[in-house]
Amino acid sequence: MKEMKRKTGGVTYRLLTFEYCLLQGLYWIASAAEMDFAAVPLLRERGFSSISIGVISAAKFLSLMFFQYLIGGFADRHRDRFPIKRIVNFLTIIAIAAALSMWLLPSGFILSLIVFIIFGGSVNCILPLIEALSIDYMSGGIKLNYTLSRATGSLTYCIAAYLLGMLTDRNGLDFSLVFLALTLAVFLFINLIMPQAPECGIKRASTVHSASFLLRNCKRYRWFLAECFFVFLGYDMNIAFLYDRVKDIGATNSEYGLIYSMIAIFEIPVALGFSKLLDIKGMSIERLMASFGIFCTARAFFTTISTNMTAMLISQSFELFGMGVFYAGSVFFVMKTVPAEDSAKGMSLVNLIGVGASETAAYFLSGFIRGSLGLMPLMYISCAVSAVGIIAGIPVASRYDRR
């Protein structure tokens, strides 16, 4: 215990876990505001067409790709001078300014495009950095309870999504921007008071590898990125205009928020019991990460064919072993398949390729498909795309001599 206190500036691992749980929890509250309400619903309320919404959303994720690549490499190369915590602080301040700008200024296409590009390079780039921060703590020998923090994130997301649904019904969708800015301000405060990650167990910057090295030499990791790309592509095409689908069956903003609450609820049991899953005979982190696409595809299909809110809510139960497994296990998968000194880059590439690239394509394609073919063809196409991810995930669980 004395050694743990020394490494974290006198903070015990229990206090560190509590603070990290707050960090994860606040991030996912902000994510509920930015991804679920201050996005397609807000733009739809402001009168934008499906194609315009698709272009603006795609620009955000294109921005994520660009900045995630730069930030991930920078964080690994210069972590001695610019710790991950400091980079997160900088991105958070920019995100707060962007949210307030969109709230206060006229809602034209150009301003919305710029703000969404800033969101992509700030809010959406923060998650892999705080995930990499947990890897730094654990690599430094600190018993951080990561799965508890992920469960906290799912719980707070669940509460925030439902709460925001009710609040935006009452105050309008512009309120989501105020909510986002306030949440990020508290997130910034928690990140400021958290201790610096120990340097123990982290190699010097001279040993950091390039992204191409990881893709060439870490085979499981490479296939995992391919799986993530197609699964997320289908997943996001399925939810891109879910707001319209909810409205089609006569539901409200509150019920729309409830759907995302259910998604988060089903992630919690896996996050809390993830280590128990790994204890099952014959189970491994590789097999778990190879299988999450099956359940994501099932969630997309049953969401598509749902004709009422009850069926749609039940359909989200597939999230239990879908995104629930992905979010709880991706950090452990990266720790096992990528060199420790490349942790920030490893998590950033998951966000870059598995989230940024897929969501850029998803929203760009969804806007055109929604505008030309209609909503239901888009939903069915999303299921087919997600199914490709199942095939890409097969090599993740295959036997390799190396990573």
Image (tube, grey):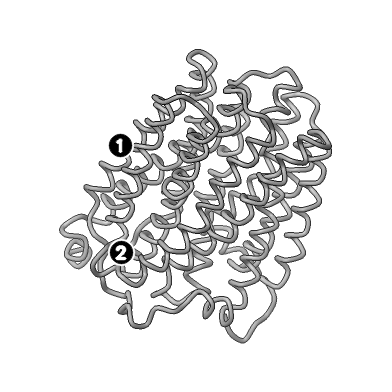
Q: Residue 15 location, x and y as percent?
A: 26, 49
Residue 336 placement (x, y as % from top left): 50, 73
The amino acid type found where label 1 is placed reads Val
Task: Identify the residue at horizontal 21%, vertical 60% (top origin).
Answer: 8
Left/right placement of residue 394 relative to residue 132 reads right
Whether residue 12 sits left or right of residue 151 in the image: it is left
Q: Secondary structure at mark 1?
A: helix
Q: Quadrant of residue 45?
A: top right
Residue annotated with mark 2: 142
Label 1 and label 2: CA atoms lie apart by 25 Å
Residue closer to the observer: 27 or 331: 27
Write down the residue under mark 1: 186
- Residue type at mark 2 is Ile
Q: Is residue 142 above or below residue 250?
A: below
Residue at the spot 41% in from the left edge and 68% down from the top edge: 73
Pick whichever of labels 1 and 2 is earlier in the sequence. 2
Q: Quadrant of residue 77?
A: bottom left
The percent position of residue 340, horizontal first and vertical second, equals 41, 74
Front label number (1 vs 2): 1
Q: Which mark is residue 160?
A: none
